[in-house]
Amino acid sequence: MSDPTPEQLQQEFVESEGRTSEHLRATQEVRQQRADICATCEFKTTMFTLDACSECNCLLGFKIFLTTADCPKGKW
């Protein structure tokens, strides 16, 4: 099995939004605050051409979306 393409990962993110329970979705304001913090973080990297965290190896587009997620460095 091959690694997913960036396009496939982006599509999965878009589709997952509709499958995620409302109480698990962070508000747009919270997602933006988290994205702003991650944008300047020294642990931000790319994985499959998507923004990722080198500390926890999560894709940031998914992680900042969930109310249950947190930054492994305590930044949010």
Image (cartoon, rainbow, N blue to C red):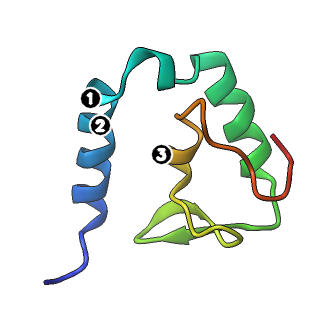
Q: Tell me the quarter of the picture where residue 30 sits.
A: top right
What residue sits right under mark 3 in the picture?
62
Observer-side mark, 1 or 3, equals 1
The amino acid at mark 3 is Phe
Q: Locate residue 10 relative to residue 71 in the image: left or right.
A: left
Question: Residue 9's x, y, as percent?
Answer: 30, 56
On screen, residue 33 versus residue 49, left or right, reads right
Q: CA distance from mark 1 to mark 3?
A: 13 Å
Q: Which residue is mark 1?
A: 19
Q: Check contact, mark 2 vs mark 1: CB within 8 A.
A: yes
In this rendering, the answer to whether 32 lies above or below 71 is above
At a point 25% along the width and 68% down the height, the residue shown is 5
User: Residue at left 55%, top 61%?
Assistant: 58
**Quick one: SS at disc 3?**
helix
Q: Position of residue 73 (x, y in %)?
A: 84, 58
The foreground one among 27 and 36 is 27
Real-space Cα separation, disc 2 to disc 1, in angstroms: 5 Å
Q: Secondary structure at mark 1?
A: helix
Q: Is residue 1 left or right of residue 9?
A: left
The image's mark for residue 16 is: 2
Residue 13, relative to residue 1: is it above or below?
above
Are circles 2 and 3 on residues that touch, CB within 8 Å? yes
Residue under the image location 62 percent in, 42 percent down: 69
